[in-house]
Image (tube, rainbow, N blue to C red):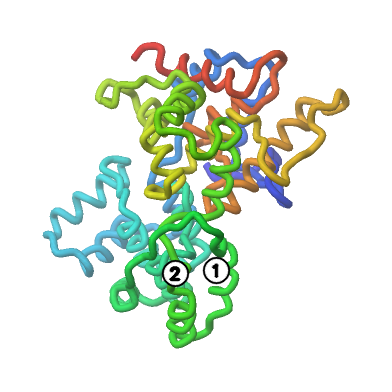
C-alpha cells in the first residue's frame, strides 16, 4: 500500500507524510493510555512490516524486478545462474536477505538508482545511509550519481582504496561537512583531489553519532570509569528486560528483529572506545534512558502548559534530528524496534520513557 495520508511524524524542519499503512500503525501506537500488552498484541496480529521487496519497489517501478536483479547479479557473480536465481528468489521472499553493504550497493547500481535514492534505500534496509567519510562509499556515491556501472565503480573504488586512519577521539570534521564538499565535485579528477586532500580525515565510523552517543552516555557514567562500571550502567539502564540468551531460534520474526544488535556492555564499550561504530539502536535506547537530554537541545518541556501531543511532537523532532545528522534513517512506524520507541516516547501519566520501554520489551518476550 503506497497511498499517502495526512498523518505525519514531525521531523526537523519538515513533516513527513505517511503512507496509509504507516499512518495506521502510528494511530495505534500513539493512542492515549495504550498499554504495553495492547501494543504487543497489535504487533503480533496486525503489524505489517516492510519486506525487502517493499523497499526495493519504492525506488524501482519496473515490473521486471526479479529479472533485473538476476541479470544484473550474473554480470558480477562467479556462482552459477541457478545459485544466483535462488539468491534473488530468497531476497524477494524475505529469506536470507543481503546484509553486506557491498552487496546492497551492487543492488543500487543494478536498479540504476542515483545517489539520493541509493542513500534512502540503504537507510530503509540497514538504518544507515551512504557514509561520506568512508572512501569506498564516497566513490560509489560519485559513480551512482553519474550512472556508471557497478563494475566500473568497484574498479575505481579498489584503485583508490587506502587504509583507514586510526579512529581518534579528537575533533574531526563531521560527515555532513564531507557530504557538502563532495556534492561540489564535477569530475573524476576533482574526486581524486578531494580524496588526497582529506585522506587523514576519512574513517569507518560516524563522528556525529559518536558525539551524540558520548553526550548521553556521560549522563549515565563519568568518562573514564572502569569497564566494570560501564557494564553495570549498561545492564542497569540499557538491557530493558531484553532476554540475555543469545540464541534466537525459538523467537518469532518480531522478537528477532527487535533483539538483533541490541547493545550489551561489550558493544557499548567498543562504541565508546571507537573500535565499533555507534549503532542506531544504541542511540535510540540512550535517548529513551536519558529523557532525550543532550547538548544544545533544551526546550522548556516540563512546563504545565505543554500538552502531551506537543511533548510527543518535540520528542519526534529531537529524535529525527539526531538520526538525520548521524546519517541514519528517521523513525518508521513499520519498523519493529521503532514501533517500540514510538510507544515509549508517547507521554503517559506517571510513566517515564524508560519504564514504558522496559514494560513493552517484557511483554514482547514474556513467552520466551
Q: Tell me: residue 165, above or below residue 229.
A: below
Q: Nearer the viewer, residue 51 or 215?
A: 215
The x and y percentages for residue 341 are 56, 30
Query: What's the distance in space between the residues labelled 1 and 2, CA to CA?
Result: 9 Å
Q: Is residue 303 visible?
A: yes
Assign a secondary structure to mark 1.
helix
Q: Nearer the viewer, mark 1 or mark 2?
A: 1
Q: Residue at x 49, y 54 (%)?
A: 169
Q: Position of residue 133 (x, y in %)?
A: 47, 64
Tell me which residue sits at (79%, 31%) in the image: 301
Q: Are marks 1 and 2 in contact (CB under 8 Å)?
A: yes
In the depicted structure, whether residue 42 falls above or below residue 146: above
Q: Nearer the viewer, residue 91 or 280?
A: 280
Quarter occupied by residue 303: top right
Q: In the rendered view, does 161 fall on the left or right side of 172? A: left
Left or right position of 79 against 66: left
Q: Please count the marks in the image.
A: 2
Q: Position of residue 4 (x, y in %)?
A: 63, 44
Q: Nearer the viewer, residue 101 or 79?
A: 101
- Residue at label 2? 138
Seen in the picture, residue 169 relative to 25 is either above or below; the reply is below
Q: Which residue is mark 1?
A: 178
Q: Which mark is residue 58?
A: none
**Residue at image location 19% in from the left, 49% down from the top:** 86
Please give left or right for residue 194 compared with residue 69 in the image: right
Residue 158: name its quadrant.
Answer: bottom left
Q: Residues within 10 Å of mark 2 (few under 14, many from 20)?
A: many
Element at label 2? helix
**Residue 304, x across and y down, in percent:** 86, 23
Quarter of the rendering containing residue 368: top left
- Closer to the camera in the image, 77 or 140: 140
Amino acid at each position: 500500500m503506497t497511498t499517502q495520508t495526512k498523518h505525519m511524524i514531525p521531523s526537523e524542519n519538515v513533516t513527513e507524510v505517511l503512507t496509509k499503512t504507516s499512518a495506521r500503525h502510528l494511530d495505534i501506537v500513539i493512542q492515549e493510555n495504550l498499554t504495553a500488552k495492547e501494543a504487543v498484541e497489535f504487533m503480533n496480529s496486525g503489524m505489517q512490516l516492510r519486506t525487502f521487496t517493499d523497499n526495493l519497489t519504492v525506488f524501482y517501478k519496473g515490473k521486471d524486478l526479479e529479472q533485473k536483479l538476476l541479470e544484473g547479479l550474473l554480470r558480477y557473480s562467479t556462482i552459477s545462474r541457478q545459485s544466483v536465481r535462488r539468491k534473488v528468489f530468497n531476497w524477494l521472499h524475505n529469506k536470507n536477505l543481503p546484509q553486506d553493504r557491498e552487496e546492497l550497493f551492487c543492488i543500487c547500481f543494478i536498479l540504476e538508482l542515483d545517489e539520493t535514492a541509493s542513500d534512502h534505500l540503504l537507510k530503509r534496509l540497514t538504518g544507515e545511509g551512504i557514509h561520506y567519510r568512508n572512501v569506498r562509499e564516497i566513490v560509489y556515491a560519485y559513480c551512482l550519481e553519474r550512472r556508471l556501472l557497478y563494475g566500473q565503480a568497484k574498479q575505481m573504488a579498489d584503485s583508490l582504496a587506502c587504509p583507514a586512519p586510526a579512529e581518534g577521539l579528537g575533533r574531526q570534521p563531521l560527515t555532513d561537512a564531507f557530504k557538502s564538499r563532495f556534492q561540489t565535485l564535477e569530475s573524476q579528477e576533482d574526486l581524486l583531489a578531494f580524496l588526497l586532500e582529506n585522506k587523514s580525515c576519512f574513517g569507518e565510523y560516524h563522528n556525529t553519532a559518536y558525539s551524540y552517543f558520548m553526550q548521553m552516555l556521560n549522563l549515565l557514567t563519568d568518562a573514564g570509569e572502569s569497564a566494570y562500571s560501564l557494564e553495570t550502567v549498561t545492564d542497569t539502564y540499557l538491557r530493558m528486560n531484553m532476554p540475555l540468551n543469545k540464541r534466537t531460534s525459538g523467537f518469532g520474526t518480531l522478537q528477532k528483529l527487535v533483539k538483533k544488535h541490541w547493545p550489551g556492555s561489550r558493544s557499548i564499550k567498543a562504541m565508546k572506545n571507537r573500535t565499533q561504530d555507534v549503532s542506531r539502536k544504541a542511540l535510540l535506547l540512550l535517548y529513551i534512558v536519558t529523557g532525550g537530554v543532550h547538548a544544545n537541545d533544551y526546550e522548556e518541556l516540563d512546563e504545565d502548559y505543554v500538552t502531551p501531543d506537543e511533548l510527543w511532537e518535540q520528542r519526534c523532532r529531537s529524535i529525527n534530528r539526531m538520526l538525520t545528522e548521524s546519517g541514519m534513517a528517521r523513525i518508521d512506524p513499520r519498523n519493529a524496534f521503532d514501533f517500540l520507541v514510538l510507544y515509549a516516547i508517547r507521554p503517559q501519566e506517571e510513566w517515564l520513557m524508560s519504564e514504558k520501554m522496559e514494560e513493552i520489551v517484557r511483554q514482547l518476550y514474556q513467552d520466551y
